[in-house]
Amino acid sequence: MKKDLIFEEIKKKRSFLCVGLDVDLKKIPNHLLNESDPIFSFCKSIIDYTAEFSIAFKINIAFFESHGSKGWKSLEKVINYISNEYPDIFTIADAKRGDIGNSSYQYAKGFFETLSFDSITVSPYMGEDSIEPFLNFKDKFAILLALTSNKGANDFQFFYSNQNPLFKEVIDISKKWKNSERLMYVVGATKTSFLKEIRKIIPDSFILIPGIGAQGGDLIEVSKNGLNNKCGIIVNSSRKIIYSDSGKKFAESARLEAKKIQIVMEKQLKIKGII
Amino acid sequence: MKKDLIFEEIKKKRSFLCVGLDVDLKKIPNHLLNESDPIFSFCKSIIDYTAEFSIAFKINIAFFESHGSKGWKSLEKVINYISNEYPDIFTIADAKRGDIGNSSYQYAKGFFETLSFDSITVSPYMGEDSIEPFLNFKDKFAILLALTSNKGANDFQFFYSNQNPLFKEVIDISKKWKNSERLMYVVGATKTSFLKEIRKIIPDSFILIPGIGAQGGDLIEVSKNGLNNKCGIIVNSSRKIIYSDSGKKFAESARLEAKKIQIVMEKQLKIKGII
């Protein structure tokens, strides 16, 4: 997908919401467990009911992979469904991959070609040659972990060298990589105080912001500190939307949660003069 | 698998060789492409012919995942085959996973329960709570990336704070984590000058050392700097063994390559007085 299309979708839907599909069989409505593929059935309903307010879907690969090849079958059905039914919605494989070059190339091929994702989250630890293979695919994006929303972010991402924490070094260095225009960044919603600084280092890049809702991040703070003049942020909510109701009307309930968030986002886009 | 069993296997086979299964359809012998599952057929032959000299098999998940659910089916067959036929051989899912807690738990469940691997490689970037879920499984191991063998290792792993590079910080900090006795570490064979220092910080931990052979690491140097009194190193070779011949006798050829390495290892184990 071309980057401009993401912005078009943001303006059209007046939203920068990404719905995260973290499908835990223990949390989905009981009645779905009788279906032949409960994971796909759940995702399909959530997708259909939230697509009106979402510009991206982030699929958490861990929750599929935990079921082995069966989970991967469901994953294929989900990504194919989105690609066919909602081709203008940006798809993110939340996979946090990263390996030596020839292995990273295999991951890139898997997620971008075999599965037709638009983007994948990647971990920076192994450096440039571990990310480069992802950046060689036209109209595909690698979303690099910079500052994550979890407690463990403090362990190494704030490892300082001359007042410069590792997460800033990751952003600074990665900007110089070949095809870096295909890089986006993960910055957790729980880290708004740093988001403003990060936005200065990468004024034009898209930033994927997980952690609003269940993880405690604040959407308005995130918007104030992260929005640029082409929006530039994609804010993810998973559990708060998809598990808002555990009964037969789970999808309608998810729709309402997504709509609530979209309304706040529309206001922020207007304040910023984007729409 | 209990850690002592790995050492028993090392003494029995007089080897600390791990054969890496990086199965690229473009590189396996042509005649296998007519089989119903060429990836599994190739792995099965390599496993059968090298098991005599190997104490571990490292399965590179990227090469399976690039084929989607079909690749995952082959992966399941390969890990089941090893678990059933060679239960004393240590299995490593070379997957380099790591995510927020509930996602890492799903990965752990996938690789340790659904797929019955003994261990998985993990990336430290997201810190303790991203690794902890892997360490909660009894007799399973998380193998933490410390210093990798690729060029990009220089980008962030040598990010210094007060003369302390990030890779050492990763080792130092991770030693204090709960269940850290279930941690092993990845140190590339191309980094022998640092292996000695690392061995001092973690005298008793197993270190997985990829990068001999195709990546240029030296087995004798690695042994001199890495061996402890319970061996403590697992040295991986992938391409040099599994692609040593592309004809009908590929498995016999792989066996000879594995044997060559085992002979060198046996000598090193004797010099160190381990056998």
Image (tube, coloured by chain):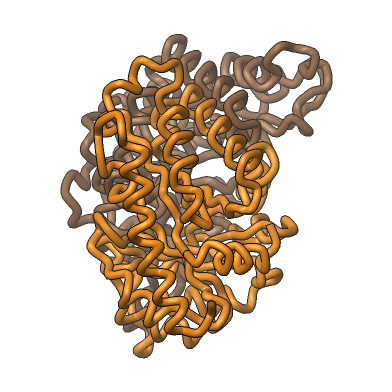
Chain colours: A orange, B brown
Q: Residue A111, how many percent across, how many down?
A: 61, 43
Quadrant where the N terminus of chain B is found in the figure? top left
Q: How many numbered dots are placed on residues in this image? A: 0
Quadrant where the C terminus of chain B is found in the figure? top left
Q: Residue B162, how many percent across, how many down?
A: 32, 83
Is residue B33 toward the left or the right of residue A2 in the image? right
Out of B253 and B148, give the one closest to the viewer.
B148
> Residue, x 43% and y 10% (percent of image)?
B84
The answer to which quarter of the image holds residue B181 is top left
> Residue, x 70% and y 62% (percent of image)?
A2
Q: Residue A106, how many percent across, how many down?
A: 65, 43
A6 to A20, vertically: above or below:
below
> Residue, x 37% and y 36% (percent of image)?
A23
Out of A216 and A200, give the one closest to the viewer.
A216
**Does residue B149 appear anywhere in the picture?**
yes
**Does residue B21 appear anywhere in the picture?**
no
A71 to B130, vertically: above or below:
above
The answer to which quarter of the image holds residue B274 is top left
The answer to which quarter of the image holds residue B249 is top right
